[in-house]
C-alpha cells in the first residue's frame, strides 16, 4: 500500500516569495510522516516546494499511490483542487483515495468533497491519518468503517456529507516524534536562504494551539487550546537539528512563544546547561512579556522577537479582541531593543470600522516604538473566524469557491480599496521618513523623497475619501 503525503505549494509560482526567499518546510506533514512510520505504516513525502506541477503529476502517475494525503491551507487551496482534478481525470489513478487536511478544509468540507476528495481530516492529522491508513491496509475502507473514525468527513452513498464525532486532541504532545525531516531534502531550504541572505534558518515547533481569541485568526486545526512539549524534548530536537544540519538560526513557529513564563525559564536554563544556544527568532504577545521574560529570551539565544500589534489604535485592537494594550506593545518593542534583541511587529490595515485617525495612530505607534522590522497586510476574512461572520453580510464580490480564496474577498469597509492602497504607501513612507531623518543632511534627496511620497499619499487618501462622500 503506497501512502504519499504532500501539500501543493510551488515556489516557482509564488513571485512574492521568490523576492523574499525565506521558504519553510511543511512541518505538519513531516509530523504525520513520523507518526505513521512510528506506528508501522510506510509512507513517502513528496515536497512540492522546489518541484513543479508537471513533475508532481508525473510522480503520481509513476507511483500510483493508494492513498494521497494533501495538506491544504489558504495559499495551497487552488493547487490542491487542481491536483484533485488531475487525479480524477486519469484512469491510471482511479483507485487513489484522496484525503485532505489542514486549516482550509474544516469549514468547507462539502465543497472539497464535491470537488473530488474522498475524506476530510478535521483538526490534528496524526491519529486520524493512522486510523485511515490502517483501515485501508485492512481492506476495510467503506462507509461503515469510516463512520467509526473520529475527526473526519466523507460523502456517503447518497451524496450526503457525514461528519463523525470530534477527535479528542492529543493531550501529551511529548508523545509526538520529531518531524520526519529526513523525508525531504531540507538542504534545499537552507541553501535557498543562505544564497539570498547569507544565513539560513530551520523551523521548529514547541506548542500546539493558542489560548487567545483574536477575531481574524483561524483556529481550524488546533482549536482554542494550549499544549506544549517539554523543554527537554525541545532541546533534544535542537541538538538533533544542529548535529544533522548545523543551521545558522532557528525559527520557532509557535503562536505565542512566551505564553508560559515557567516553561521559558526552564527552557532557557536547559539551553545554557546543555550548551545548545542557537540564535532564534519567535513570535509572542506584549502582555506575555516583561523585563524578566526578555532577559530569559536573551539567555536562551533569541536574536529577534516578533510582537503582535496589528494596529496602533486601541479602539481597533479592542475591536479585534486582541486583549492587549497598545502601550504594552510599544514598551516591549522598545525594551527588547534595549536588551539587544531585534524587534518585529505586524500591522493590519482595513479592519472593519478603521478610520483615518486610527491609521494615523498606527503611524505614530510605529514611529515611537521604531521596530527593526514590520509587515503590513490588508485585513481579509477567513471562513470560520469571528471576523468572517461579522462581515459576511457586507461582501462586495461573489467569487466562485473553486477558483478563488478568502484572501480575495472584498467587504464593505469605511473606505475603498484604492484608499487603502494610498494608506499603505503613506504608512511605509512616513515611517521611513521618521527613521531616516538623521541622514537628512548626508542624503537629503533620498530622505525628503520619503516625506514627499508620504504627503502625496495623504493627499490622495483625502481625495479618495472625498470621492466616496
Image (cartoon, rainbow, N blue to C red):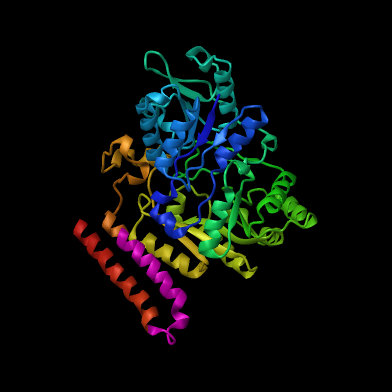
Percent position (x, y) of residue 348?
42, 55
Residue 362 is covered by the magenta coloring? no
The segment highlighted magenta reads 421-444
Residue visible at 65% across and 60% down?
279
Residue visible at 56% across and 33% down?
124
Residue closer to the observer: 293 or 234: 234
Residue closer to the observer: 296 or 235: 235
Residue 94 occupies quadrant:
top left
Residue 440 is covered by the magenta coloring? yes
Position of the C terminus by quadrant: bottom left
Residue 401 occupies quadrant:
top left
Magenta segment's dominant SS is helix
Position of the N terminus by quadrant: top right
Percent position (x, y) of residue 460?
26, 66
Is residue 175 depicted above or below 294 in this figure? above
Residue 348 in sight: no
Q: Residue furthest front?
A: 62
Amino acid at each position: 500500500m503506497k501512502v504519499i503525503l504532500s501539500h501543493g505549494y510551488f515556489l516557482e509560482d509564488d513571485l512574492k516569495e521568490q523576492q523574499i526567499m525565506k521558504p519553510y518546510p511543511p512541518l505538519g506533514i513531516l509530523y504525520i510522516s513520523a507518526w505513521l512510520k512510528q506506528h508501522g505504516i510506510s509512507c513517502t513525502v513528496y515536497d512540492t516546494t522546489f518541484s513543479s506541477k508537471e513533475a508532481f503529476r508525473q510522480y503520481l502517475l509513476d507511483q500510483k499511490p493508494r492513498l494521497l494525503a494533501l495538506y491544504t491551507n489558504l495559499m495551497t487551496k487552488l493547487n490542491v483542487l487542481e491536483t484533485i482534478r488531475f487525479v480524477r481525470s486519469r484512469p491510471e489513478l482511479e483507485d487513489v483515495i484522496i484525503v485532505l487536511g489542514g486549516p482550509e478544509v474544516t469549514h468547507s468540507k462539502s465543497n472539497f468533497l464535491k470537488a473530488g476528495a474522498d475524506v476530510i481530516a478535521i483538526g490534528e492529522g496524526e491519529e486520524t491519518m493512522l486510523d485511515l491508513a490502517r483501515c485501508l491496509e485492512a481492506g476495510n475502507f467503506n462507509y461503515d468503517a469510516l463512520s467509526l473514525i473520529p475527526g473526519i468527513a466523507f460523502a456517503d452513498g447518497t451524496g450526503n456529507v457525514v461528519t463523525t464525532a470530534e477527535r479528542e486532541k492529543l493531550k501529551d504532545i511529548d508523545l509526538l516524534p520529531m518531524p520526519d525531516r529526513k523525508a525531504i531534502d531540507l538542504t534545499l531550504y537552507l541553501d535557498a536562504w543562505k544564497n539570498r541572505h547569507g544565513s539560513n534558518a530551520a523551523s521548529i515547533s514547541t506548542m500546539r494551539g493558542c489560548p487567545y481569541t483574536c477575531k481574524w485568526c483561524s483556529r481550524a486545526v488546533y482549536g482554542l487550546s494550549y499544549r506544549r512539549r517539554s523543554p527537554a524534548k525541545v532541546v533534544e530536537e535542537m541538538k538533533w537539528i544542529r548535529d544533522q544540519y548545523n543551521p545558522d538560526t532557528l525559527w520557532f513557529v509557535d503562536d505565542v512563544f512566551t505564553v508560559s513564563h515557567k516553561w521559558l525559564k526552564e527552557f532557557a536554563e536547559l539551553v545554557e546547561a546543555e550548551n545548545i544556544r542557537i540564535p532564534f527568532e519567535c513570535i509572542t504577545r506584549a502582555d506575555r512579556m516583561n523585563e524578566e521574560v526578555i532577559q530569559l529570551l536573551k539567555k536562551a539565544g533569541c536574536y529577534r522577537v516578533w510582537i503582535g500589534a496589528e494596529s496602533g489604535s486601541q479602539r481597533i485592537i479592542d475591536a479585534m479582541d486582541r486583549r492587549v494594550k497598545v502601550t504594552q506593545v510599544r514598551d516591549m518593542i522598545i525594551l527588547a531593543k534595549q536588551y539587544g534583541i531585534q524587534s518585529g511587529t505586524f500591522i493590519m490595515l482595513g479592519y472593519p470600522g478603521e478610520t483615518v485617525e486610527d491609521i494615523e495612530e498606527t503611524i505614530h505607534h510605529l514611529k515611537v516604538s521604531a521596530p527593526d522590522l514590520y509587515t503590513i497586510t490588508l485585513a481579509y476574512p477567513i471562513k470560520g473566524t469571528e471576523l468572517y461572520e461579522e462581515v459576511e453580510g457586507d461582501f462586495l464580490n461573489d467569487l466562485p469557491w473553486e477558483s478563488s480564496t478568502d484572501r480575495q474577498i472584498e467587504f464593505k469597509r469605511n473606505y475603498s480599496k484604492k484608499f487603502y492602497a494610498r494608506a499603505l504607501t503613506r504608512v511605509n513612507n512616513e515611517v521611513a521618513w521618521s527613521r531616516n531623518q538623521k541622514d537628512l543632511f548626508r542624503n537629503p534627496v533620498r530622505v525628503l523623497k520619503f516625506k514627499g511620497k508620504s504627503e502625496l499619499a495623504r493627499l490622495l487618501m483625502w481625495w479618495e475619501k472625498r470621492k466616496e462622500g
